[in-house]
Amino acid sequence: MSDSIIRVYDPNQDRSACVRIMEEVGWGLGDHKETGTLWDSYISDCSVLVAEMQGEAEAWAICRDGDMRYLNQVLPLGFITGVATSRIARGQGLALRTTASIIAEAAERGSPIARLGIFDQGFYDRLGFGSLGYIRLSTIDPSSLRVPRLTRPPHRLTIDDAEVMHACRERRMRWHGACNLTGTGATHSEILWEKTKFGLGFKNQDGQLSHCLLLKPKGEHGPYALDWMAYETSEQFIELLSVLKSLSDQVHGILMADPPHVQMQDMIETPFRTLRSREGGTFDMKPRSNAYEQLRILDLHACINAVTLPGETVQFNLELDDPIADWLPADAAWKGIAGSYRVTLGSSSNVEEGAEPSLPTVTATVGALSRLWIGARSAASLSISDDFRCAPELCDAIDRVMRLPRPITDWDA
């Protein structure tokens, strides 16, 4: 819009309007003062841009720095933790333009990747994002967990423990794709958002919180919702499951996602019998799977250089389209990563500018390439569902090389 301005958030000028937007989109606490406290925690240590219309902020986008594990490396990450538009500014492209600008800022700060959660598929594809894999959610009967009885009481954790809980999350066991967010506000605001949430955890011999979980209760018998678990060893993971089992005398169901690289069905006694007996009820265990996280490459060289996979090598030309350019201001320093490249993938991967006539060619959007790079989908799959085109033999060669673990971000925001 010609009469809108995207600029850095000014707390003196914009705080009240941004809090109002939180209330308008249903993310507030129902009280302007309490939502204001939540807002301050939510954006602490973050970059915030607002879109101003007629002198007032009517949209905002928030980016919190962090990092992501890629194979055995850790890469900087720009985590888009929130985007919202007021009731009077919908359908005018403000959310996309503001988000594009804050992504460009993250790229200029040196983040080679950006990640966000989606309200539906398709919207952020216009900024070059591609979906990650399915997250499997189900309601389990905690009494059916195949874990030992709890042998020691956990510590009660509240919002006053947000700093040590956040540090515990940062130290947790991480696999390919797992993200960390910088700043205690990332955990503090999660707890503040729902006042009934509570944490339980254990300390090591040095008095440091070593493993913990965060739960949201519901009524007397649940189902409770497990927000997250943080642990450094498999033994600690089992002890946290024992904590859930210890609640089963009162709580009949706990809604949770499968933990990284664990199928919860393997941890439950008679899963199908229990599923059938509860079908259609309050504690129905029927699982559901959705892909509600997306990722995109911001620095192609840094991301391709991180690919170190044993076995054969594949080389190809890459004609890359990046739709984010359509949403960036004309004077933006970073304009996306569209272009022509020569890509080598294997034990030592790299990318160079320009095409080599003797090589086969892949034509793709940055969203499709990002899904391939992180291991969310194979080249063969992308050639069906996404804008990813190449000869079938090249598709097969890429998939023989890009054998990556399933990426799991393990941090919802």
Image (cartoon, helix red, strand yellow):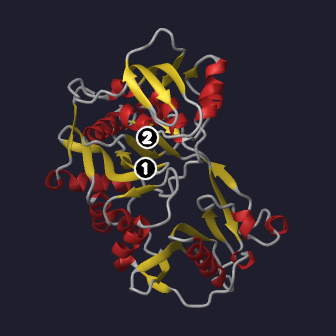
Name which residue type carries label 2.
Ala
Q: Residue at x 30, y 28 (%)?
A: 328
State the image quarter where residue 26 is shown.
bottom left
**Any mark on residue 230, and which?**
none
- Residue type highlighted by circle 1: Gln
* Label ID, residue 306: 2
Q: Is residue 10 left or right of residue 368?
A: left
- In what quadrant of the picture does the C terminus appear? bottom left
Q: Which residue ends up furthest to the top in the rendered image?
A: 357
- Element at label 2: loop
Residue 268, percent across and down? 75, 70
**Quadrant of the snapshot with the N terminus:** top left
Where residue 73 sits in the image (x, y, percent)?
43, 50
Residue depicted at 23% across the width and 23% down the height: 330
* Residue position marked by numbered label 1 in the rendering: 73
Is residue 333 visible to us here?
A: yes
Q: Residues within 10 Å of mark 2 (few under 14, many from 20)?
A: many
- Within the image, what quadrant is residue 349 found in? top left
* Left/right of residue 10 with respect to residue 147 in the rendered view: left
Tell me, yes or no, whether the two marked residues, 2 and 1, touch with CB atoms within 8 Å. yes
